[in-house]
Amino acid sequence: MTSPCDLLVCLCSRVSEGELIEAIHAGHQDVAALREATGANTGCGDCLEDLEDLLAHEAEGNGSEEGGPQKPALHHPEGGPL
């Protein structure tokens, strides 16, 4: 079974929501820092809005105790498990 955190947010660099959440919790608090840490948003740029939404969501403290999202996973419609 696929976890929401396994879903790809950045298809070009194959970066999952879980990887992005880990990077945010490690202190990468803006898109440029996430780009540097994970490689997300270095290809076509389609995931920019998803990265911004995820950053805002985590900043609001809406992540779960285990670090996972409380809302539906952000991902491209073509995305899927790693």
Image (cartoon, rainbow, N blue to C red):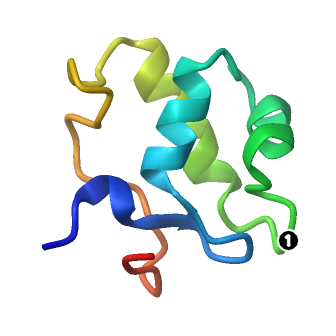
Instruction: Tell me what residue is drawn at x 56 percent, y 29 percent.
Output: 55
Q: Residue furthest bottom?
A: 78
Horizontal and vertical percent for residue 81?
37, 77
Of 76 and 11, which appears nearest the observer? 11
- Is residue 52 placed above or below 50 in the rendered structure? above
Amino acid type, residue under disc 1 in the picture: Gly
Q: Is residue 15 left or right of residue 73?
A: right
- Is residue 3 placed above or below 63 in the rendered structure? below
What secondary structure is found at the residue carrying circle 1? loop
Instruction: Tell me what residue is drawn at x 80 percent, y 55 percent.
Output: 39
Q: Is residue 32 left or right of residue 70?
A: right
Horizontal and vertical percent for residue 24?
58, 26
Give the residue at mark 1: 43
Of 57 and 18, which appears nearest the observer? 18
- Is residue 38 placed above or below 37 in the rendered structure? below
Horizontal and vertical percent for residue 6?
36, 62
Quadrant location of residue 73? Answer: bottom left
Q: Is residue 51 left or right of residue 30?
A: left
**Quadrant of the drawing holding the N terminus:** bottom left
- Is residue 21 placed above or below 26 in the rendered structure? below
Number of other residues with Cα within 10 Å of mark 1, as a class: few under 14, some 14 to 19, many 20 or more: few
Total numbered circles: 1
Instruction: Tell me what residue is drawn at x 86 percent, y 61 percent.
Output: 42
Quadrant location of residue 62? Answer: top left
Quadrant location of residue 74? Answer: bottom left
Instruction: Tell me what residue is drawn at x 51 percent, y 33 percent.
Output: 22
Of 52 and 29, which appears nearest the observer? 29
Q: Is residue 57 left or right of residue 63?
A: right
**Quadrant of the drawing holding the C terminus:** bottom left
